[in-house]
Amino acid sequence: MSEEYQGKRSWAEPYKIKVVEPIKMTTREYREQAIKEAGYNTFLLRSDDVYIDLLTDSGTNAMSDRQWAGIMLGDEAYAGSRNFYYLEDNVRKYYGMPYFVPTHQGRAAEHMISRILIKPGDYIPGNMYFTTTRAHQELAGGIFVDVIIDEAHDPEDEHPFKGNVDIAKLDALVERVGAAKIPYVCMAGPVNMAGGQPFSMENLRAVKAWCDKHSVRLWFDATRATENAYFIKQREAGYQDKTIAEILKEICSCFEGLWISAKKDLMVNIGGFLATRDAEVFEKARNMVVLFEGLHTYGGLAGRDMEAMARGIEEMVDYDTIRARIGQVEYCGRQLERFGVPIVRPIGGHAVFLDAKKILAHIPQEQFPAQTLTAEIYIDSGVRSMERGIVSAGRDKDTGQDKKPELELVRLTFPRRVYTQAHIDVMVESIANVYQNRKKVRGLKMVYEPEFLRFFQARFERV
Ligand SMILES: *Cc1c(COP(=O)(O)O)cnc(C)c1O
C-alpha cells in the first residue's frame, strides 16, 4: 500500500522568512460593509482590511536582507551620492545603457520621454497599452495605436508570445500617417493588459528591422523585462543555455532607450529611471528631471532607495529568484484550472487573469463584470484583486464614449517574495467558491468618475 516515490521533485522558494508582518482576519459581514464604503472599488479599501493583497505587484515586494542592509548605506547628499554611481554602474552593466536619469517612479520617466519625443498629432504604436504610459503619451498630444498581434485579444489563444507586435499593423500605420508622424515604437513585455504575455526575441528583431528601415526610434518599457527574458529562455529556441542577464542585455541592445518602474523587477518599494544610448535625449531628460523630480543624481529618490535598486538589479537576474516568482504565479493558475475557473492562457508572468466576461456572462459590460468580480472575491475571503476591463480602459479622448475592450479581466497580481503556497491555496478555494455561486451575482453602476485614470478612484453601487 505504500506510495512509491516517483522521482518527481517539487521546487521551493530560494529564500526563507526572517521578519513577519501579521495580517488582520475579518468576517464576511465586516467585508460587505468595507467594500460598500469603498464604493466597490478595491483601490479604495484600507489595506488593513485586506487579508491577501493581490492588487498589484508594484512596490509591494519583500526586499532581501542585502537590500535592507544597503538602506543603511544611503548617502543622503544632495548631489553626487555614492548610491547614484553604484546604480548607474548597474544600469550600464545589466541594461547596457550608457546614460541614465533616476526618477521617483516609472510614470515620471514616461512623462519626460513623452514630452521629449512626442509632438501634438503624432502617433505612437505600442504592443497594447499600459495605463500610465498611454496617459502620458496622450497628455503630450500623441495618439496611441495598438499594434499587438490579434492573438493577444483572445484569452484562450495559446500563442507562446502573445506580446508580439504585428508588423503588418505597423505597415498599415506608416501607410496611413507617414513615418514622420511616428516618433517611436513603444514596446513593453510581458504585456500587462494582455495577461502578462511576453514578446519573442525573433519578433523584437523584426520590429527593430522595421524601425531601422523607416528611421523610427524604438523605445522600451523595461519594467518587467526580466520576466520577459525568463519566458524567452523557457520558450524560444536557442536561448535555453543563456543566462537571464545575457538575454536581458540582448533585449536591451535592440532599443535606443528604456524606462522602468523599479517597483516591479527590482523588488523595491519605490523608484524608477530613464536610460538611453541617445546623448541628445539624455541631455533633455537630465535637464527636465530637475524641474519635475529633483537633481539628476537623485531624481526624487533618497540615496538609500537608489542603493536598494542597485542591489535589486543584481538579485532580479538570478535564475532561481525569477523562476520562483513566475513558478508561484503558474502554481496559482494551475490550481484555478483544476476548479474549472476560466483564466487567460497561457498563464502570465506576474499575474493570473480571471476571464470575468465568461465567469459573469450574465452581466453586460455596461455593468462592469470585472469590477463586480473583484468585489465578490473580496467579500468572500478578503483577497484584494484589480479590474482590468472597461473601467481601466477609460473614455475615448475624442468622442467621450467608454472604450469597450474585448477583454474583461480580473488581475490577481503577486508581490515578489511575499506570500506562501498556503496563501495561494486559500485564495484559490475562495475564487472557486465565488465561481460556483456566480449566477447569483448582480452588476454595478458607476456613481462617481474622476477625469484621469478613473479605475483608481471611481465609485460604484450595486444595480
Ligand atoms: C508600473 C508600470 C508603469 C508605471 O510605473 P510607476 O512606478 O507605477 O509610476 C509603467 N509601465 C509598466 C509596464 C508598469 O508595470
Image (cartoon, rainbow, N blue to C red):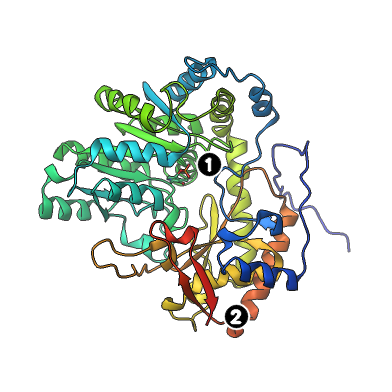
In the rendered image, the quadrant that contains the N terminus is: bottom right
Q: Position of residue 246 (x, y in %)?
A: 45, 29
Residue 73 shows in this picture: yes
Q: Position of residue 250 (x, y in %)?
A: 38, 31
Tell me how far mark 2 sits from mark 1, CA to CA. 33 Å
Residue, x 10% and y 48% (percent of image)? 178
> Which label number is shown at residue 264?
1
Residue, x 44% and y 33% (percent of image)? 248
The local secondary structure at tag 2 comes to: helix
Write down the quadrant of residue 309 in the picture. top right
The local secondary structure at tag 1 comes to: loop
Queried on whether the Cβ of the residue with tag 1 lies below 8 angstroms from ligand 1, the answer reads yes
Say above or below: 246 vs 327: above
Q: List the residue tagged with mark 2.
A: 438
Say above or below: 339 vs 388: below
Task: Give the residue type at disc 1.
Answer: Lys
Say above or below: 261 vs 7: above
Task: Give the residue type at disc 2.
Answer: Arg
Q: Position of residue 282 (x, y in %)?
A: 31, 25
Q: Quadrant of ligand 1?
A: top left
In this rendering, position of residue 62 left or right of residue 19 = left
Residue, x 23% and y 49% (percent of image)? 142
Residue, x 29% and y 48% (percent of image)? 139
